[in-house]
Amino acid sequence: KRQKGAFSMTAVTYDEQQLIAIHNAGTRTDTISALKEMREYISAEETELKAITDSAISRLEEMTDEEYEQLDLIPDFFD
């Protein structure tokens, strides 16, 4: 297991980045909370969204606040 702060920016997938951007609450910890709250409303059939959400939460928990601030958090609604 990696230590906190050993996070690689390239580790964030496009889908995770978009989900984080949409639920960006201003800080890393607030965004984790927002994603955890949103996850409660995902239906059992939405397995892919649940997996991406879980992965995004894990990545946010692994990174530092400084690394979070370096993420491109503008949603790309045109892809």
Image (cartoon, rainbow, N blue to C red):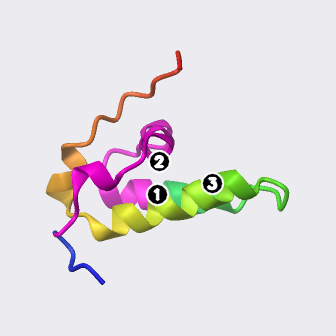
Q: Which residues are magenta?
A: 6-32
Sequence-first disc among 1 and 2? 2
Q: Which of the numbered marks, if any, corresponds to residue 38?
A: 3
Give the mark toward the camera: 1 or 3: 1
User: How much space separates mark 1 and mark 3, taking CA atoms?
Assistant: 12 Å
Residue tagged 2: 16
Q: Is residue 54 left or right of residue 39?
A: left
Percent coordinates x, y for residue 69 in the rendering: 20, 46
Residue at figure coordinates x 53%, y 20% from the top left: 79
User: How much space separates mark 2 and mark 3, taking CA atoms?
Assistant: 14 Å
Cβ–Cβ under 8 Å for marks 1 and 3? no
Where is residue 38, by image quadrant?
bottom right
Tag 3: Cα neighbours inside 10 Å, few (<14), some, or many (≥20)?
A: few
Q: Is residue 51 left or right of residue 66?
A: right
Cβ–Cβ under 8 Å for marks 1 and 2? yes
Q: In front here: 66 or 1?
A: 1
